[in-house]
Image: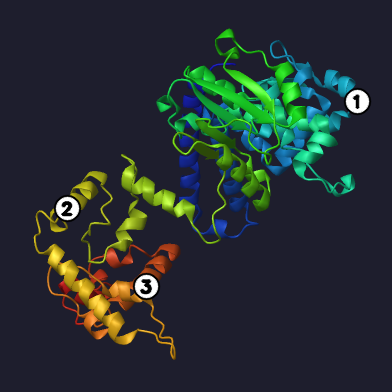
Amino acid sequence: MPPFNATNAESLATLITEQVNKYVDMMRDCNGISDEPSSQYSQKLQEQAEVVTNACSKLQASVVEPSQWVGQAAWSYCDSVALSRVFEMNIHKLIEPEGEGATMECLTKSTGASPELISRIMRQCMNRSIFGQVEPGRYQHNRHSLRLLDENFGSLIHYLQVPVFRKASFSELPLYEYYHSVDTNRGQQFSRAMAGHYDSPLDKPIELIFPFRDVPAGSLVVDIGGGNGQQSIRLVSLYPQLSCVVQDHQSVVAVAEKASMLAETIASRITWEAHDYCAPQPQKGAAIYLLSYVLRDNTDAKCIRIIQAVAQARDPEKSTLLIHDFVDLPSGYDLHLLSVWAHVNTKPGYERTEWFYKPLRSEHRRDSVFTPTDSKKHEQRRKLLGPGLSVNKTHHIEIAINECLDELIHLIRSKYISSDAEIVPVDLARKLQYFLIILGKTFGNLQSDTDTDSCIKSIEEAFIMWAAALASGVGRLPQIPFIGPLFLPSSKDKRGFGRFMSK
């Protein structure tokens, strides 16, 4: 594979800086002329923007790992069609990996396609920096297109292009039964595609998720649905104490056993076994039962049967069921948001942006424990909370918690006890908001069963206003001198969040 070209990346970075500065200068000079899309100046701005984005795309292509870059292309639509035609015409094989490349005449003669079609296909691929052009009408491989020559990775990319079932097939069979009994060639291509998936950095290796190094010597890993065994081959190569049994459909196992050329150091520690996932598991008491990207392709009912078969075979004292798969979370569950907060709070060097955190200040131009954008200051301020919430340093905190618990229980028993004749509903989520531990005088919410100073109400309203301010771009307005104090709460307020601040 051609090495990474650091000089080219540096040149592109310089070019991007120059072109961005030019674009910024043009925007500053336009004085509103560019507001009209049809204006001549607007057209020039658009052209300059395209120069910037094209340069950025080239820089991205130069620094992204080749397998990742080609994989991204396979998941897009127009690029995907072009890649599909490359495979169907074997264009990637007609162009020699080294040499002067292939001419348009050579490609049209070998494929039987028109020069116009070849030109469109290659132009689409080159827009994604897959293949290069030595001169007009002569194409060559680059570091990205060379990955297509790898049989396993090439099978993965080609597999992504072709719909598995089309209405024209008239097949009612489940996916894998169709592969095993009808279209066996595509079934074999799927197995090679999965091998390409595990061989390339398109997914996080499972050994970075599960500590295989800690598994005792002589342990057996049962790779259920392991296909060609690519995952198991890598695991036994990395961990000499492991042995693996790769289980899959008979048609897959027959091909995998013939195709596998294992090194002597691992050949004795990996075997293949034909197995129906839902049938009783023949390997009893294994250390690890691995289901890697198996459950997502089956119905819920079949997944239950697969897991039950493993559960009946496992040894409760030593067996582990390891599920390596995508998780389909319930609707409305924002995993991305959770990931962002995890990075913000745990990753060193993660930048806390001012556009988001500064508008969240509840006091004018004064940070809370939540809003500092300097990571070191944020960490220091968080540590200051420790003594205040420590039982060792704050001896009365346990007493305060017990008192609040007593008040919460008394509130429920006195007002929200149901009987056979009447059901009394209680909004426990709201009552728990009343259960507030503070270092000072309580708010009295539990005693009165109300939001006494409208503190909770003001917080809920503040979040809505903060979100609207951030979305509209005016979030920094409350931080402006002479203006901010008019918008933000004050410790002198008698009600709302200001009352909370005063306590």
**Residue 429 tag number:** 3
Identify the element where label 3 is drawn. helix
Tag 1 residue: 112
* Chain-order first, disc 1 or disc 3: 1
Q: Which residue lies furthest to the top in this view?
A: 264
Can you tell which quarter of the image residue 456 is in?
bottom left
Amino acid type, callout 1? Gly
Marks 2/1: CA–CA distance = 74 Å
Other residues around mark 1 within 10 Å, as few (<14) / some (14–19) / many (≥20): few
Tag 2 residue: 386
Marks 1/3: CA–CA distance = 70 Å
Amino acid type, callout 3? Ala
Q: Which of 268 and 260 is in front in this view?
A: 268
Mark 2 or 1: the one toward you? 2
* Chain-order first, disc 2 or disc 1: 1
Place of residue 310 in the rendered image (x, y in percent of width and height, measured from the top left): 58, 39
